Amino acid sequence: MNHQDDLIDVLRDFSKTDASKDMDPHWTYGRRGFLKSGVAAAATVAMPFSILGSKKAHAVQLPFSPDYGPLAPVADEVTGLPLLQLPEGFKYWSYGWTGDVMTDGIATPGAHDGMAVVAADANKIVLVRNHEQGSRTAGSYANPKITYDPLCNGGTTNLVFSPRTKQWVGAYASISGTIRNCAGGPTPWNSWITCEETSDGPHNGASKQHGYCFDVPATGVAKPVPLVDMGCFSHEAVAVDPVTGIIYETEDSTPSGFYRFIPNVIGRPEMGGKLQMMKLKTANNAVRTINGVSYGYYNTGVAQAPGTTFDVEWVNIDEPNKPFITGTSYGGVVAQGIMQGASSIVRGEGVWYGNGVIYVCSTSGGAAGKGQIFAYDPRRETFTLVYESSGADVCDNPDNIAWSPRGSLILCEDGGNSVSRCHGLTTDGTVFPFIANNADFRTGAIGTYTRPSGRSFSSNSMGSEFCGATFHNEWLFVNTQSPGITYAITGPWDNGAL
């Protein structure tokens, strides 16, 4: 079967909205992944990071992985350009550059961000990719049937990759008319919940209220109907616990809540449910004034030793669809939690299910303000600091995170370094750079590059953040936000922890 035949088959499959029923969900929710990371695993190997900061182990920074080796520029298998730096033996295939014409005839939107593999079989891997576009005047890039707000240009695209042929097969628009689709998360029901990182609305130019989550299926297109009970706030990402069906949510704000959504029907978040915010059982260390009244709460972003563990309880959010504190234009949901003593993380961003626990990224937390990684154990109801960056040279404000099939985390930086990186974080506390951005299109570097769409790239994009890291077996998929490129990476994974 050639590439054109693959494309025809995919188009036929994707015309059926229930085609994903014949595919497996994200690998952590498949049978093999679930056995590795479900309740049984949680009972025996949960919290592998908990020894960090103890006498048994300490976080160790390395210039590169001792197993994978140092990074060096590697030529893209598609364009021949040295767009990434990787360890020896790794290869990659670029796709879906901003402006490229997709299978449905629509130009690929820009600002690539969160992404995940949402379904797969032997012949294809399906991903959903966010586009963190935030205009309230540019208009939807998709047709009206899949558009939420016709004035806005955020949304998602679905991509298909053939692991057998090592080729990208196609892509199409799956929802638009949203604002700042930053991250989200894969689900056990073969979809991606995309999140709006905003609380914009008619008060500042949009035609509808924003700040919601939307469920985007692996095949077909999304219904542009917000999941209102999951809250109206500056969403970042979600992670689903397959044991209970509870959806955990982060909020990119300060202060920001860590939430859980208990659905009325597991796997059907559109059927409504209860929203709650995490409260740690510890003394308050911060105060928030709301409408002239001071409320105490615990801010997790302060300096504390890795391994510090808190017991967790939850407070109800009675009005999840309240975007604003009365008389203001911000914080209506998180304020309900703070007023009940709920706790805050500093810029809650990436969140991912793996090994029976929920990993949570506090992008600006810690003594240096350069990021923390926590692990919430839903069976033990504990929240543990597992890693804290000591500076930008170590790990510069991790944002999107993902759990790997080999049992480690990958962290995507969102800081100010001139060269953006992805890091591996192993269970023994070792952190090391695994990818570095090498996309400098200035004269004297790669030089100006023009795509088949006619769009040219001529600026230095090495500082553009990596985002949307997601694994499937021997493949790692990841985006760079500007100029907007998606990569499929493979290589000798078993040599190391990622």
Image (cartoon, grey):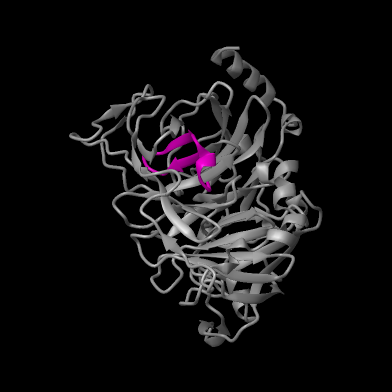
Report if residue 127 lies within the magenta region: no
Residue 122, image x, y percentages: 67, 26
Residue 467 can be seen, yes or no: yes
- Left or right, 173 with reference to 205: right
- Left or right, 334 with reference to 97: right
Residue range (magenta): 477-498
Kindly identify the residue that appears in the image at 29 percent across and 28 percent down.
Answer: 449
Report if residue 482 lies within the magenta region: yes
- Left or right, 304 with reference to 22: left
Q: Is residue 242 above or below residue 111?
A: below
Residue 135 can be seen, yes or no: no
Residue 69, image x, y percentages: 39, 44
> Closer to the camera, 441 or 386?
386
Kindly identify the residue that appears in the image at 74 percent across and 65 percent down.
Answer: 379
- How many callouts does the rendering have? 0
Q: Is residue 289 above or below residue 471?
A: below
